[in-house]
Image (cartoon, coloured by chain):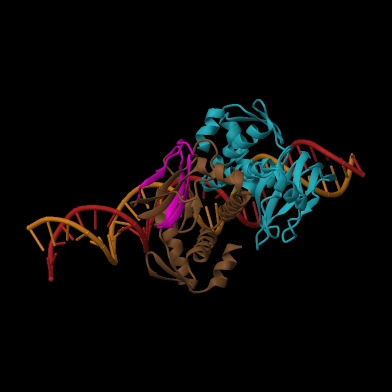
Chain colours: A brown, B cyan, C orange, D red
Amino acid sequence: MAGTLVNFPRAAQIYVEGSSASHIYQVLDGAVRVYKLLADGRRQIGGFYLPQDLFGLEENDGRQFFAEAIKASSILVIKRSKLKVLAARQSELISGLLLHTSRELAHMRNLAIMLGCKTAQERLAGFLLEMAGRLSKDDTVDLPMSRQDIADYLGLTIETVSRTFTQLENQSSIDILSRRRVVLRNRNALVGLDA
Amino acid sequence: MAGTLVNFPRAAQIYVEGSSASHIYQVLDGAVRVYKLLADGRRQIGGFYLPQDLFGLEENDGRQFFAEAIKASSILVIKRSKLKVLAARQSELISGLLLHTSRELAHMRNLAIMLGCKTAQERLAGFLLEMAGRLSKDDTVDLPMSRQDIADYLGLTIETVSRTFTQLENQSSIDILSRRRVVLRNRNALVGLDA
DNA sequence: CGAATCATTGAGGAATTTCAAGTGGTGTGG
DNA sequence: CCACACCACTTGAAATTCCTCAATGATTCG
């Protein structure tokens, strides 16, 4: 079921809202943000996709979101029509897709829980734990996305995200080695904020 | 694939967090809320389910959420194991499930967008439009859920929800015929707030 | 009718946003 | 190699929004 490998530079559009959902995608290297633009120009990010992650499957008719490379990324692009042909033969595949959408769903539910959380600390703690789980083996996380991306994901402003990073560091919950590199120093404190 | 019809009284638990996801459910009559309890006792509602809606499918291992009847409800309860047997024969069914999870996913994305919206008016406007789309043919909506339910869905307090209802009415965006009955008087104004 | 539950309203306080200024890296050209 | 510009991020102060606490009002049900 190999598709085509495409390299996207930083900030390149992968698909835009309203376009037909004729392909699905798998991140081989890099990072992708999927987002919606609100009427007043604000941006709500629906998810980040990291190596191995599939995305672009869920929209049935036209795309509801934009997808964009956060940094230079290698993406496997697969024709959707191919999927259906394969699916007819292999129920394995389609149940795999079912599993995938289930996980996506669980992820979105988790995001909704996080956004339902009221304080900025709770949201950022939840975010850092999620990212650590997805792209770190130990407690050091290299964030591929900017503060603005995080803000748009968590429904906060960039200033609040920045201040909250500082607060978590002052509380010894995290260390900020560099802007993009964070160490989870006290996971329990973060978990306590999260749930 | 008929399951068992069960009548749940108001506020009855349908399943609890941590229980095995051995059944799926379809609302025949009534309304259901699915929610998570946070450590500090707050409640985040992940979705409302209305007649015809399926729920309880997405959790693979143990339940991540609670499900509860908002009012007296008739629910079709279907053993999950039966599904798999049927699915092996009918790829129709399993692709129907795929469609269902896709829709659920779209719904959760929409919720996340709404929660990412900053103001209470934006969130409530989005909620009212969603509900009108799901349970009204015209502009009159009979809400099955309480103000507290709405608050927990939108990540707000009951007081803010109440005040925001009043604001929308004062702005002539809605009419409040009774607590549970709302007329969307100016959809454009609501849509303007929503997206 | 009275009790209980749910909803509305008010006042004060806490958190986030907004607006504005300043810091710190990074890259480019002199 | 340094000066400069540029960009992302941080920090500060004031304004706004929402939350908390409290009291009141409305609806339902026994």
Q: Quadrant of residue A15?
A: top left
- Magenta span contains residue B148: no
| Vertical position of residue B78 compared to residue B41: above or below | above
Split into 4 quadrants, where in the image is the C terminus of chain A? bottom right
| Vertical position of residue A126 compared to residue A102: above or below | below
Q: Position of residue A60 (x, y in %)?
A: 55, 39
Residue A180 horizontal side relative to residue A193, left or right: left
Q: Position of residue B160 (x, y in %)?
A: 61, 45
Residue B9 horizontal side relative to residue A31, left or right: right
Residue B170 horizontal side relative to residue A149, left or right: right
Q: Quadrant of residue B27?
A: top right
Instruction: Give the camera-side residue of A112 and A64.
Output: A64
| Observer able to see residue A155 | no
Residue D9 horizontal side relative to residue D16, left or right: left
Q: Which residues are magenta?
A: A11-40
| Observer able to see residue A34 | yes
Q: Position of residue A184 (x, y in %)?
A: 49, 71
Instruction: Give the camera-side residue of B54 and D2.
Output: B54
